[in-house]
Image (tube, rainbow, N blue to C red):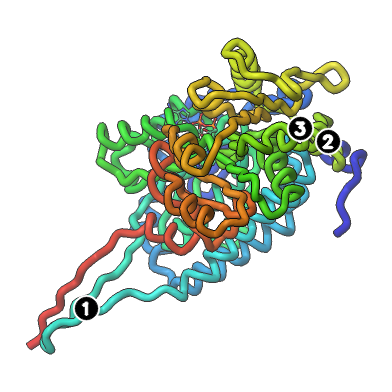
Amino acid sequence: MNLPDHAGWKKMANEFTHQTKAFIGGDYVDAQSGKTYETINPATEKMTAHVAACDAHDVDIAVKSARTAFNDGRWSRLAPRERGKVLQKLAALVLDHADILALMECLNVGKPIMEARMADINLASEALKWYGEAIDKLTDEIIATPDNVRATITREPMGVVGVVVPWNFPLLMACWKIAPALAAGNSVIIKPSEQTPQSILKLAELAIAAGIPEGVFNVITGHGTEAGAAIGLHNDIDCLTFTGSTAVGKKFLEYSGRSNMKTVWLECGGKNPNIVMADCPDMDKAVMNAAMNAFFNQGEVCAAASRLLVEETIKDEFIERVAMIGKTRVPGDPLNPKTNLGAIVDKNQYDRVNRYINKGQEEGADLVLGGDTVTIDGTGLYINPTIFKNVQSTMTIAREEIFGPVLAAISFKDINEAINIANDSPYGLAAGIWTRDINVAHKAARDLQVGSVSINSYSSIDIALPFGGYKQSGIGVDKSLHAIEKYTNMKSTWLELD
Ligand code: NAD
């Protein structure tokens, strides 16, 4: 693969023109109010664009457009195979534009360009392709009835689906939702995070080029409290699918209750335990995984292995080895293909992570790595990989989602204690267990209150596996065939014959 070098990516960044308009009814449009807001590149702290600040008025126009498209059947009534072909074409177009899409993620999120290029964009394309390929393989049900009756259970698209996503993997989180929603025949209105609108706005252009009809795919840019709330409260949106913080997820449940009782699906926060037993079969792999999954994407990952639970007898050596790997993740210019740790997305998040680091020290945890910030050429929101040990599960850094490169290491005496600590959390997204003992592995897989358990690995992300949370990590799943169910209504039809 022929990818640009550092100078090449910088040149592309200098020449890049940011999209500043929302995308409604097949066209890029300003907010009706004319208002805009600024996006900032966290690596340079410089303003990058003035983007349309949409509000309830714009959301209403987008909903009308999406509803008209849904009702006239231009997409909803296409044969599933035809919709599938369009989604597969869109997947191919995403790959054709992978460099520019990766650049957009890099400039908006501050993430390393190669991680954006190789992970975010490839996985986003894969999601579109996978649902495109899957949708004509599904069948409905016929029920056993008396001879004079034909009773069926069918799945129908819900109508207009509102999609609200975060900034950590902008295009990927969007595609995990819009791919099954569109495959099922819905129209969608998506609101990217205010920090990261570019890649999703570009996807709108590619969607039209792939053959998704006008009005079926709309992008509302703007603030959560205005545009996001207006989507949540709209009376003609049938389903709302959200990825983001637990606090905002709860607001969408309220919005639904205050409006039309739309179905709400939530993918929220995590504080994920990665449990390492002394009989771990491959310590090198466990050390590498513990570090990589704590610091990948600056730790801004819902499924980050942010709580390291290590058996007492091996804890010092294991944590020391994780710290050695942590040191190899060095903050650098996200446009440099060699960079493996980028900037924190914005000043709010940077301050928040630093507050947690201070809190960890105040509450008595031992800092073994990092804890400090850096600048590159005198600027940028960078935080060094940070590890605390001797963390108690009552401490704030063990309980709250930090969403930064901060690892809290807790020790335990046996598997029962490890599982108790792991489950002592309002979250339940993902977990890892490293052991040679199949009985321990089985017990952990059964007793951990999380949506995904990895055994002797961490966080397998295959698109065919559901990904969702227990407890306050969410409601419903992304990925897998089960995600399609989220965007369909189930209908029973009883046909009585002569
Ligand atoms: P966030 O909750 O602040 O924002 C998410 C989205 O909600 C954004 O588009 C935002 O504009 C919108 N929003 C914010 N306030 C709103 C309001 N009052 N009403 C309506 N909409 C509003 O989350 P974030 O900071 O963008 O992302 C980080 C969070 O996302 C973390 O908690 C992380 O765990 C979570 N996340 C979860 C998953 C998962 O699959 N479980 C994946 C990625 C990220």
Task: Please state the horizontal and vertical placement of residue 475, each as a whole percent of the image.
Answer: 38, 45
Quadrant of the rendered image containing residue 71: bottom left
The correct choice, above or below, for 230 with respect to 130 in the image is above
Disc 3 residue: CB within 8 Å of ligand 1: no
The correct choice, above or below, for 305 with respect to 222 in the image is below
Looking at the picture, which amino acid does disc 2 mark?
Thr
Residue at image coords 83%, 37%: 339
* Element class at badge 2: loop
Is any part of residue 178 visible from this angle?
no
Q: Which residue is mark 2?
A: 328
Residue at image coords 62%, 28%: 408
Q: Earlier in the sequence, mark 1 or mark 3?
A: 1
**160 left or right of 98 in image:** left
| Mark 1 closeness class: few <14, some 14–19, many ≥20 residues within 10 Å | few
Task: Please state the horizontal and vertical placement of residue 199, each as a whole percent of the image.
Answer: 65, 43
Residue at image coords 61%, 45%: 277
Looking at the picture, which amino acid does disc 1 mark?
Ile
Q: Which residue is mark 1?
A: 143
In the picture, which quadrant includes the C terminus?
bottom left
Looking at the picture, which amino acid does disc 3 mark?
Glu
Name the one closer to the observer, 263 or 273: 273
Q: Which residue is mark 3?
A: 320
Name the one closer to the observer, 384 or 11: 384
Q: Nearer the viewer, mark 1 or mark 2?
A: 2
